[in-house]
Amino acid sequence: MKVFEAIADAVVAHGVDTVFGLLGDANMFLVADLVDRHGVRFVAARNENAAVMMADGYARSTGRCAVATVTQGPGLAVAGAALTIARQARTPLVLIAGDTPPGDPLHVQHFDQQPYALATAGTFVPVAAASTAVRDVGLAFRAARELPGPVVLNVPIDLADAPAPPVPVVAPAVPRAPRPLVPDPADVEALAERLRSARRPVLLAGRGAEPSAAAIRDLADRSGALLATTLMAAGLFAGHPYDLGVAGGLSRAPARRTLARADLVVTFGAGLNRWTADHGELFPEAVVVGVDVDPAAIGARWPVTAGVVGDAGETARAVSAVLAPVRRPRWRSPELAAELAVADPFAGLAVESTTDRIDPRAFIRICAERLPRERTTVVGVGHFGGWPNLLLDSAATDRSFLAPWEFGSIGVGLPFAVGAAVGRPDRPVVAFEGDGSLLTGLGELDTLARVGAPVLLVLLDDAAYGAEVRKLAPRGVDPGLARFPARDLAAVARALGLPAWTVTDSAGARAAFDEVLPLTGPAVLHVRVRPDVVQEKF
């Protein structure tokens, strides 16, 4: 047995059945062995950065540790942005990277991979000897799951082909789930007192509070508080009469008006940041208390008055236990409940399309009417993302909303959608992407065609880098620098094997949805949108 075969055995022992990547000299035999001997599904991307993004999307949609592989030198170098995104999102991911022989520093693909991996992924596990290969695979998976975050498992090409000593591959022990962190009783009483004395409290839940939704809802009912979520936890309290929906720059009008009056906001498992607070405009008069299992996260991105270190559910239940029921009929009013029940995000919008370009708000309204409710929604990075995020109800529960914005990198929508579709084939994926973003990784249209998964790629095309246009013009700089010629992206998609439609008006949008839905395979809607319709909160 050779080292690459021992590594393949160890990877499969960790429950891996899918690997994303790109072949090269330093990893092609490992991939072939995973496929031929173990039956692992290999999803071949056209770019290493996209391959790691696909693995990230797979991990986020499934909760599993994902695996990708790239070759030596430029293979790893190209994946740097994706590794940084995964690091900031704390995505459990193992990237098996080939490396040049340590004894050949003049190799054409040589560069020092360790500092690069540490600067991007943050964790580096070298396979230093044939005798340690199986152990090192285990170390990489353990680090990815426990930190969590991406890990570069580095395998020199000459070592991969060396004989491996017989080492038994033992299935890793399943670690016990850690006990929920119980908050300090003094912090519990202090938070209960704040809820007693507040006049207009709001409980704001983030993605980390999803398992604790029922406990937070009960605390809201007991304390007379309203409920809200971050965008990443959208839909967590759907159906509750006092659910304000998303809190942040993308808050809708009723939520924005109500949150402006809040005098206490308690966050649970939320990475409270400038966007959630809308740069201080959303709840300017409120005392903010953060509840999080990580003490370093409390107040790290937005100032808080106080913090409680504890599990969201444990904290909510503990506060409920010491808090007598509080009625707030003027805060939790029948009028507010009635307003929230009939709120229309499209009300009051002056929607106007031109002869050759649809108003993006008109198109998103049709999306709201036609898209399946049970879906995974992926929204890429850019001005275009403001429209689906503000106007489209995309529930984030059960890992069904992916917004890989951590590093602000464009070009994420399509690869994350492919990874999510591979990971959760039980539900279709709808991905919103911009023309500028797509053109940074056009080759992944071919990947989508080959994978054949039910992914509807919606390209909101304003023939520009829309965010840059909106930032250049007010400073007196020619926004033409960020504008580009119109391209027939539907024709490009069809040339790469994908059914595609061009949409320029509402009738065309409805006709395209008639043909696309129900979604059984990949499809592309190239939507030419008005470039002058501005979403300030993207």
Image (spheres, rainbow, N blue to C red):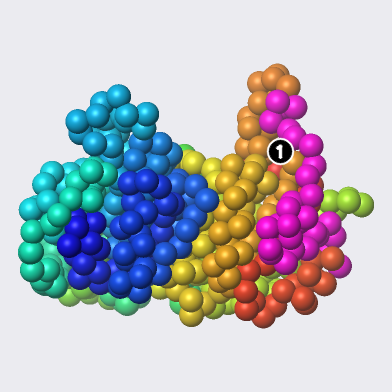
Residue 10 position in % (x across, y down): 19, 64
Say which residue appears at 40% left-offset and 69% top-offset: 41
Q: Which residues are magenta?
A: 479-507
In which quarter of the view is residue 208 placed? bottom left
Asked if 348 appears above or below 518 in the picture, the reply is: above
Please name whichever residue, 455 or 133, is drawn nearer the observer in this view of the structure: 133
Residue 120 position in % (x across, y down): 32, 38
Judging by the rendered image, the residue that carries numbered circle 1 is 464
Relative side of 152 to 479, left or right: left
Say which residue appears at 64% left-offset and 61% top-offset: 457
Asked if 257 appears above or below 400 in the picture, the reply is: above
Answer whether residue 263 is magenta in the image: no
Say which residue appears at 26% left-offset and 44% top-offset: 157
Residue 185 position in % (x across, y down): 9, 62
Please name whichever residue, 494 or 437, is drawn nearer the observer in this view of the structure: 494
Please name whichever residue, 466 or 206, is drawn nearer the observer in this view of the structure: 466
- Is residue 288 in sight in this rendering? no
